[in-house]
Amino acid sequence: MLTENKPIVDLDEKVIPEKTTEPKVDLDEKVIPEKTTEPKVDLDEKVIPEKTTKPKSIRPKPKSELNLLLFRKWDFSSVEVNDFGLKDVIFLQPTIIPTSFGRHEHKRFAKSRVNIVERLINNLMHFGKRKAKNSGRMGGKKQKSMNIVKSAFQIIELETNSNPIEQLVRAIENAAPNEDTTTIAYGGVRYHVSVDISPQRRVDLALRFISLAVRETSFSTQKSAEEILALELILAAKNDSNSFSIKKKFEQERMAMSAR
């Protein structure tokens, strides 16, 4: 009987497994994740909301940032004082209605912090009889004086096509005298001596001369007080010798020069 030639198998022999192409996996090795293109999110980072089209709440501007116009027409910001001696006493703080309700009363030198337009209005209130200064039909009527100044400023703007506040400042600079006279007693005899004037008094005299021009001229002509004030400010701003306030200034300085 024929038998097949089968290979003899040794049971004690170790079986070596065949090599495979699969890579070995190290369980202790750290697994590094693949890089992704998604941006990282920082949880601690502040989230900035997107801009919306909703209207923001309107916050009122502080008073210093507002451009206040005199009588809602004329600007103070473009006006400058050219006379260095009068820069500290001509006050040009923006305001709509030039009135301080007498807050500067009973305070020394506080009138230098009063708006220059209001000081002109206060000087025009002394508008009564020809020689009277503190009584009459205009005594204490500030609203009437304010209307006169407002109308005069409108005339100045039409005549010169410029800011009437600037014309007022130039008129005060030209009409303010530099010298005055005072009396001293020496040996029982009084002498007139020439003295220099402080900046505060220079502005006081200039405003007094301008208001006196309106008061004196209005009694000898048919023109209104508004027209006379406008004409006086225009002439004084040009340093014209026909101006009443310029004449008063030259007269005072001539007397002071003779008393030297």
Image (cartoon, grey):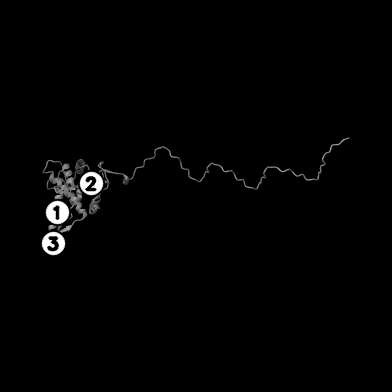
Mark 1 or 3 closer to N-term?
3
* Residue at (21, 48) in percent of width and height: 170
Report, in whole angstroms, how far the alpha carbon at label 2 lies from the one at label 1. Answer: 25 Å
Res 108 → quadrant: bottom left
Residue 67, image x, y percentages:
29, 44
In the orientation shown, which residue stands out farthest toward the right?
A: 1
Res 252 → quadrant: bottom left
Q: Secondary structure at mark 1?
A: helix
Q: Nearer the viewer, residue 154 or 158?
A: 158
Q: Is residue 185 visible?
A: yes
Task: Describe residue 75's horizontal placement relative to residue 182 as left or right.
Answer: right
Q: Tell me the mark number nearer the camera, choosing from 2 and 1.
A: 2
Quadrant containing the C terminus in the rendered view = bottom left
Image height check: is 20 above or below 88? above
Image height check: is 52 above or below 135? above
Q: Nearer the viewer, residue 65 or 235?
A: 235
Mark 2 or 1 closer to N-term?
2
For badge 3, the amino acid type reads Ala
Q: Nearer the viewer, residue 120 or 172?
A: 172
Image height check: is 224 above or below 90? above
- Disc 3: which residue: 185
Residue 92, image x, y percentages:
25, 48
Quadrant containing the N terminus in the rendered view = top right
- Disc 2: which residue: 166
- Disc 1: which residue: 252
